[in-house]
Amino acid sequence: MLRTVAMAAMLGITGGLPSPGAAADDDGQWTTVAKDASNTRYAALAQIDRTTVRNLKLAFRFSTGVTRGHEAAPLVIGSTMVIVTPYPNIVYALDLSRPGANVKWKFEPKPLAEAQGVACCDVVNRGAAYADGRIFFNTLDNQTIALDLQTGRELWRTRLGEIRRGETMTMAPLVVKGKVLVGNSGGEMGVRGWLTALDAATGRIVWRAWSTGPDKDVLIGPSFRPYYAQDRGTDLGVKSWPPEAWKIGGGTAWGFLSYDPELDLVYYGTANPGPWNPEQRPGDNKWTSGTFARRPDTGEAIWFYQWNPHDLHDYDGVNEHVLVDLPVGGTGGGGPGGRLRKVLLHPDRNGYLYVLDRATGEVLSADPFVPITSSLGVDLPSGRLRPNPQTAPRTGEVVRNICPASPGGKDWQPSAWSPRTRLLYIPHQNLCQDAASYEVGYIAGTPYVGADVKMKPGPGGHRGEFSAWDPVARRKAWRITEHFPVWSGALATAGDLVFYGTMDGWFKAVDARSGELLWQQQLSSGIIGQPVSYLGPDGKQYVAVLAGVGGWAGAVVAAGLDARDGTAALGFANAMRDLPQRTRLGGALYVFALP
Amino acid sequence: MAAPEGPRTLRVCVDPDNLPYSQAGGTGYEPALARLLADELKLPLQLHWQPMRRGLVRKTLGDGVCDALLTVPQGLDRLLTTRAYYRSSHVLLTRQADPAPLRSLDDPRLPQLRIGVQLIGDDLAASPPGHALVRRGAVARVVGYTVDGGSTQDADDGQGPAAQRMAAALARGQLDAGLAWGPQAGWFAAQAQPPLALQVLAAPAGLGLPFEFGMAVGVRRGETAWRDRLQAALDARQADIDALLDRWHVPRVPNLPNLPNVQHGPSVPNAAPPPPSPEPPK
């Protein structure tokens, strides 16, 4: 394969992941869904910049043959691009060394069709992982599969969960030190959450860390040093629940994983607790809706912080952790001029942009990035979220204007960091909801009463936003309002551009410093994928994204739901009634470059 | 849907593992009810087997694989129903041999007793009796049986419907009582060894949630003529249907077929529509 001279400054690391801060060198590949283990989603490529981007043109397009929500990031390893489709989770490898879309190989894992009926929020897949010549990906029916990158030959597959129990897998694995880390989905079904490490060579399970239950299941031992007193004690994953309720406690691990090789810590969040009615599960419900820092070799927990103790609003804690080093101070609000600190940035479902010390789990700041009525703030001395009793759900009554709505200030869609602007680019929504704890439902021959939730636009009337957040100044530098929730990932580049897509199919490039729209093109379907940028074998910079509307926000189109029924898609349909007029089903990879 | 009166075959979706409604092989009261209706309507019958989980209306009627569901709550959102052809209630199960069984949710022992409930639907919503237990401080010793095979009980092997597992646990002595939806409770109580006693419960005052539901036949919204044909068939064969439900041990409460399912709690009205779409940017 060809590489330009400018790119000869390769990282000294082979087969590993770049360290936090190593953004200056870029080998032009995209070997992990978030670009690097720090999850920056930043490409240090500047051929496409603020003056040239207006000439950006379609280089090629590839139809995946699948028409559900396409959430994955394409990987680029050398001259091979790898994409994973939603169910049935086809893996395509494209040969980038020739013009156009050339399928080098295709792998069809043939997951069980019944898995589609179990997935809560569209049958998505967020992408594959790569290490040492192998591709790793998850199927909806709970298999992790390894393939040979060059040939697509299956090397191993391991089944990790049971669809009969409501379990599925949608997340993109992360490979750390020869282990493939994967997590499950299905907290809505009472699935007990876990993170599992598989040996990359054999697929054998090396360790599993449960999200609830006794310490021996959660892999909490003598090295566990949570920062706050409320997280210290033995077997809190049992004691913070009514007896035995932890067995159906949720806390699944379906988000993105980060890794700091210097601290040797993997970071990931756990989803919300079950059951839905918080009155049935008094207690803090550990270790749900929070973040673990664990050692990748053994899985042992080093620290934990709970974003939402005793969660009331379906706020999963699984959103990404972007690892950066910033001049921020300690508790009471740091500011510019503080010492350089290893932190993580985490935009939570609950609407706060958190900055945590990633060595200890201490909360350094927590500031709203959307309007919030569901809580009153984060008390920094205790580290505890202060819920707002006015917006707590009450059986038999309507509670109005709960902000943010259940998908949160931001859901799974990942943000991007630019080391040049020092801003975090956050794709997100602006939604509130009214909720009544009463709606007759019916499943498996049993009538029940569930939450009647109707989501609606938040203050301002727009349902989506793309915000540039300054974590040192603790405020937005700029923001763009969008008609629909911005459900795609973000991409930042050294050309001082940020890319994202809208649910009605507009792929946009904006000025990273000002937010000015510099280029856009409407694609064949709404965009909820993760955009990437890479150097092709010809030395040109490319930007690639999957289009194909769906996901929870797009279920009204992807699942063909009746938009007149506002409670469909767990109440999201109410806020998305106009989406079917603005886009349609699709599934295609789009790759752009300068002419 | 070519003919104005509706389908020319009675195509019904049934669950392959959900007694007393249906089970693969053709048992359960729904296949028998389907044969009754097909006979009355003078249509051939086709059963389409499909588990009824999340999205069941969309995946059956919505996808067009069948034209009727035989047991749905009267007035259920997302489809059009006949009037209820029977009415049942969530019920209380205890062991017949229990010398001092639970008889009422006002029993002061309630928080100390091990009580099973079904957990179903979005985020494991509890059945209305489950909510009643919570209101009475009975949380710590409640055992939830999820539709998808989970529970908090070690001895639960996750096989079979939630009510079946609950009845088995009660019979074994691992529960003191069970609260389950009538048709399911009735069938599994009748199978249990040692025998179980079943008692209809009234919804506690002030709960704001119903214990009783009228059960009807459901069709796609808008198919009024087809629904009316099914209604006429149900009316004509009500006596046979009552006997069928007796054979399957479905507990019933007085059915007032013209009484719609009364909403005991407020529902959320539709929010204001979103603002008009702006012109696509140039």
Image (spheres, coloured by chain):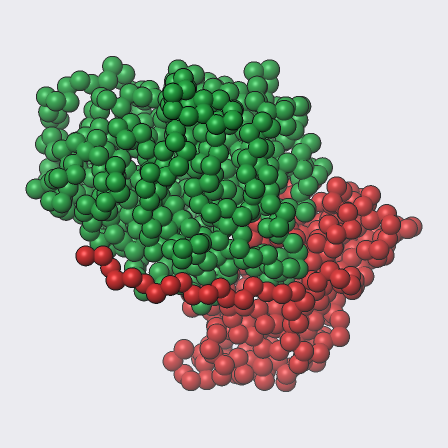
Chain colours: A green, B red
Nearer the observer, A558 or B69: A558
Q: Position of residue B197 (x, y in %)?
A: 82, 57
> Residue at the spot x=23%, y=40% of the render?
A511
> Residue at the spot x=71%, y=45% of the render?
B143
Nearer the observer, B229 or A569: A569
Q: Position of residue A477 (x, y in %)?
A: 33, 38
Q: Is residue A445 above or below residue A236?
A: below
Judge from the rendering whether residue A574 lies leftward or rightward of residue A528; answer left or right: right
> Residue at the spot x=67%, y=78% of the render?
B259
Q: Position of residue A139 (x, y in %)?
A: 40, 40
Q: Is residue A110 above or below residue B130?
A: above
Of the 4 image quadrants, the one containing the N terminus of chain A is: top left
Q: Is residue A49 above or below residue A189?
A: above
Q: Can residue A378 be seen from the camera position used here?
A: yes
Judge from the rendering whether residue A426 lies leftward or rightward of residue A294; answer left or right: left
Judge from the rendering whether residue B96 lies leftward or rightward of residue A300; answer left or right: right
Q: Can residue B169 be seen from the camera position used here?
A: no
Q: Quadrant of residue A344?
A: top left
> Residue at the spot x=73%, y=60% of the render?
B207
